[in-house]
Image: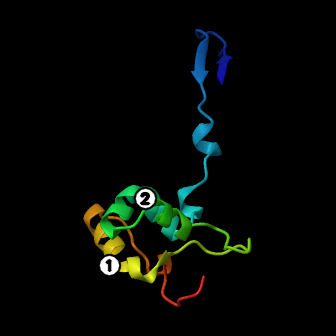
């Protein structure tokens, strides 16, 4: 949005406001697994793990097969690969990003 304003005795200024970043989801509020996938790239994780990108997306869905909400997490079997990639990229890799209990 382009806004114009004038201050008495000074030339008129035009200021462009970019509202797009304010409208985007704050990465801090995203679940840990989603933040990691966004940072590393789903296709890169899939390639290193030897699965399809669709498998990564399925693991990170925020609803289960019945439509009930759930916390998106990587399967525990992804831990070593994802942790190693996080270390290489120097990003945080909390245990909460993984489903160590075996449930959805």
Q: Does residue 12 lie above or below 28 as drawn?
A: above
Q: Does residue 29 lie above or below 26 as drawn?
A: below
Can you give x and y, in whole percent of width and height, for residue 66 in the image?
73, 75
Task: Please give left or right for residue 95 compared with residue 25 in the image.
Answer: left
Q: Does residue 38 lie above or below 1 as drawn?
A: below
Q: Residue at x 57, y 63 (%)?
A: 30
Tell me how far mark 1 sits from mark 2, CA to CA.
16 Å
The residue that label 1 is drawn on is: 80
Can you give x and y, in whole percent of width and height, for residue 31 in the image?
56, 68
Q: Quadrant of residue 93?
A: bottom left
The residue that label 2 is drawn on is: 42
**Structural crowding at the residue carrying mark 2, measured as other residues with C-alpha within 10 Å and reported as few (<14), some (14–19) or many (≥20):** some
Can you give x and y, in whole percent of width and height, for residue 103 in the image?
58, 87
How many numbered marks have been drawn onto this rendered protein structure?
2
Q: Residue at x 58, y 9 (%)?
A: 11
Quarter of the image containing the C terminus? bottom right
Task: Please give left or right for residue 54 compared with residue 26 in the image.
Answer: left
Can you give x and y, in whole percent of width and height, for residue 18 in the image?
59, 32
């Amino acid at each position: 949005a382009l806004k114009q304003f004038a201050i008495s005795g000074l030339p008129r200024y035009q200021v462009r406001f970019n509202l797009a970043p304010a409208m985007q989801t704050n990465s801090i509020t995203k679940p840990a697994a989603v933040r990691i996938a966004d940072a590393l790239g789903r296709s890169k994780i899939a390639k290193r793990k030897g699965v399809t990108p669709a498998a990564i997306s399925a693991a990170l869905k925020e609803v289960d097969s019945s439509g009930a909400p759930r916390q998106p997490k990587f399967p525990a079997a992804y831990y070593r690969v994802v942790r190693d990639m996080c270390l290489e990229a120097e990003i945080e890799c909390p245990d909460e990003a993984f489903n160590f209990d075996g449930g959805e």
